[in-house]
Every structure is written in C-alpha cells, then in structure tokens.
Image (spheres, rainbow, N blue to C red):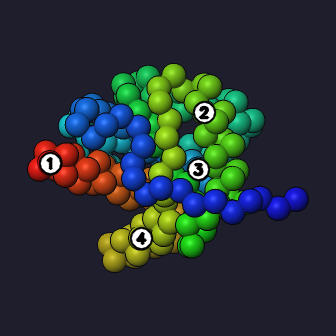
Amino acid sequence: MSTPSMTLSMRPAGPPASELVVRVLGIDLGTKRIGLALSDSSATVASPLTVVVREGDRESQHRVLREIVTEYEAELVVVGLPLSLDGTIGPAAQRALDEIDKLRATIGVPVEPYDERLTTVTADRALGSAGVRGSKRRAVIDKVAAAVMLQAWLDSRAVARDLEETE
C-alpha cells in the first residue's frame, strides 16, 4: 500500500512565536534508539540530553519519555520528522507521524513534528570534526542529532518572533 505524497509547511507550528516557551524537549525517533535534547530555560539553546534504547513495547518507551518531560519540566515536545529530501512524507515520516499521535496521548504536553532532514548527517560531521570515533560516536549521535533538530526549531521560532516585532 502506498502512502500519498504530501508536503508540510516549514513554518513552525505550536504557540505563537511571541509566547515564551520555558523548556522544550527535542526527540529524534530512531529504530534502535531515541535521542533526546533539552533547551535551556529561555528556549534559546539546545543541548544533547540522553538516549533511550528501544527495548520492550512503544507504550513503555512513551512512559519513559513522559517521565523525562515531567522531570525536566518541559512544556513542549518537538519530534523530528524524517521528510524525504523533496519535502514529502515517505514511509519513515509516516511511521514518525503515527508515533507522534501516540505520544500526544501519553506525554501530557503539546507534541509537534519538525523537519529533521540531514540532522543526523550534521551531527555525524560535527562529531567527526571533534574527533569522536567508533562506539563513542554511535553512543551519542542520536542525542546530538536531537540537539541539532531542536536548535533549528528554536532558531526558527526566534526568527518568527523577530519578524513579528518588526511588523
């Protein structure tokens, strides 16, 4: 069964840019690991947080994510959406959207998708430039990719906020 082709708007969703989001959790959904990143309290800078290994069922993984949201007092969760290079929703993005729907029912705060194209490539290059190799690189790449994606989301919100202020 084929998935219909769709494109998504690159404009950040969620609350208007003028509203302050205190802390945001970024999630990079991998097939073996889930990378997590967290913004600072001013929602300006993203930092790698941790990796959750995909063990057991999705419901238990989502409960772990809910506990992390609670522990770090995140008010919003941004999940990387692996769009095709042409911006369409392929099978991987559809799986992510399906999981995002399930997360919304579990997490307890708003959850929104955000384009994550090339974030793992960017993270891999940054780790390579820093001299991180082998098993150390594999252990951190998912949370670094989550931080790259979350930082892009935070930056897009800052640009939108600046544009609102100049109007």
| Mark 1 / mark 3, whichever is N-terminal | 3
> Marks 1 and 3: which is nearer the front?
1
Residue projecting furthest to the right: 1
Q: Residue at x 51, y 22 (%)?
A: 108
Q: Nearer the viewer, residue 116 or 31?
A: 116
The residue to which callout 4 is attached is 122
Q: Measured along the vertical axis of the image, is residue 127 above or below residue 98?
A: below
> Marks 2 and 3: which is nearer the front?
2
Q: Local crowd at mark 1 within 10 Å, few (<14), some, or many (≥20)?
A: few
Mark 2 residue type:
Leu
Question: For the residues marked 4 and 3, what is the alpha-carbon distance in whole angstroms?
Answer: 16 Å
Q: Position of residue 121 (x, y in %)?
A: 47, 72
Question: For the residues marked 2 and 4, what is the alpha-carbon distance in whole angstroms?
Answer: 26 Å
Tell me the SS state at disc 2: helix
Mark 3 residue type:
Leu
Q: Residue at x 50, y 35 (%)?
A: 111
Q: Nearer the viewer, residue 149 or 61?
A: 149
The residue to which callout 2 is attached is 103
The picture quadrant where one finds residue 83 is bottom right
> Marks 4 and 1: which is nearer the front?
1
Q: Local crowd at mark 4 within 10 Å, few (<14), some, or many (≥20)?
A: some
Q: Residue at x 64, y 46 (%)?
A: 97
Q: Position of residue 107 (x, y in %)?
A: 54, 27
| Mark 2 / mark 3, whichever is N-terminal | 3
The residue to which callout 1 is attached is 167
Question: For the residues marked 2 and 3, what is the alpha-carbon distance in whole angstroms?
Answer: 11 Å
Q: Position of residue 98 (x, y in %)?
A: 69, 43
| Mark 1 / mark 2, whichever is N-terminal | 2
Q: Residue at x 19, y 46 (%)?
A: 164
| 118 sits left or right of 93 in the view | left
Question: For the residues marked 4 and 1, what is the alpha-carbon distance in whole angstroms?
Answer: 33 Å
